[in-house]
Image (cartoon, grey):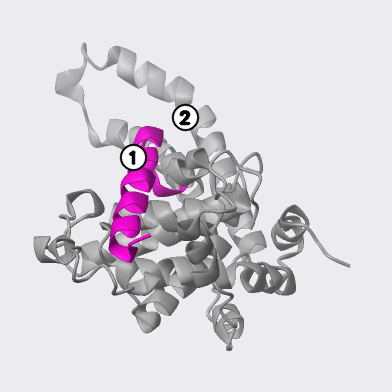
Amino acid sequence: MSFTDADLIARVLLREDQNAFGELVRRYQSPVRGFLMKMTNGDTHLADDLAQEAFVKVWKKLGSFRSEGKFSTWLFGIAHNEWRMSVRGRKEVALEDLPDPPAEVEQTDDAAASHLRLDLAEAMKVLTAAERAAIVLCCQNGLSHEEAAQALDCPLGTVKTNVLRGREKLRRRLTI
Amino acid sequence: MKTDLPNAPEANDPLDAMLREADGYLPDNGFTARVLTSLPARRKHSWRRLVVLSTAMLIGTVLVLWQLPAAYAIFSTLPRHWSAFQSQTLFAIVPLLAALASLGWVVFVVANEDQ
């Protein structure tokens, strides 16, 4: 028998059922860890640590989850927040202040490099963090622009712009 | 996840195909177990906290109600008898302040419960 997210959440809240919470973690560990892996530029250890922190936070704050929204949107929001706090904690620049990647990355997109197909993981590094987050949530995890805006805590227009810009950069970088 | 979205990837777009392919399933590899072992006791002592908070709230409310007439009398005569403000007056106000503080503490604790 397969439980819905709402069933599992209700079991956690009413019975403090760790098995139900474990099922939620199993269900979402891959997209959350994948998302954080991309946000940390492939640092798997950091991504897993952040994902673990995110799920612990979900456990603590599950009572404040509003069921009118999707659980995955809420979860990605928490995961994104964990990443943002880790960036701030390491005294790096905040998401909105992240500069575009160095110009030389863009400049390699010439005729000589056109035959070179970089894999997607490398190409993603061309994107700013905000573009990467929007692309991963909307194009890889199937969130709508509205849901991504909610998860990333930014205006809808910003998400749409970041998706468009990100896709355009990826196309150029991957020569497709 | 789902594909019936306004911004759903186009079936023939090579970029979308590449993004979908790259988003493979990550095996659990003990991740869920690690999360479960690191979970704090979420509501283990919630009944105890509830009893403590309820008792504090009850005591605070009773004290406030009990002291209210006296406090009103003290404050209403305070301007006239300011020079005669003595330790006896202070003694009457302290429980009221304590009661208000206990109420404030309960509100604070309840408001920050989920953080």
* Residue A119 spot, x, y in % from top left: 37, 74
Q: Quadrant of residue B91?
A: top left
**Residue depicted at 41% across the width and 37% down the height:** B100
Disc number at residue A161?
1
Q: Quadrant of residue A162?
A: top left
Image height of A139 relative to A104, above or below: above
* Residue B97 spot, x, y in % from top left: 36, 37
A9 drawn magenta: no
Is residue A28 rendered to the left or right of residue B63? right
Proximity of marks 2 and 1: CB atoms separated by less than 8 Å:
no
The range drawn in magenta is: A151-176
> Mark 2: which secondary structure?
helix
Prevailing secondary structure class for the magenta stretch in the rendered image: helix
Image height of A6 relative to A115, above or below: above
Residue B114 is at least partly visible in this image = no
Is residue A36 rendered to the left or right of residue A24? left
* Residue A24 spot, x, y in % from top left: 66, 67
Q: Nearer the viewer, mark 2 or mark 1?
A: 1
* Residue B56 spot, x, y in % from top left: 54, 48
> Mark 1: which secondary structure?
helix
Of all chains, the one bearing label 2 is: B
As shown in the figure, which amino acid type bears the numbered disc 2? Gln
View extreme (right): residue: A1
As shown in the figure, which amino acid type bears the numbered disc 1? Thr
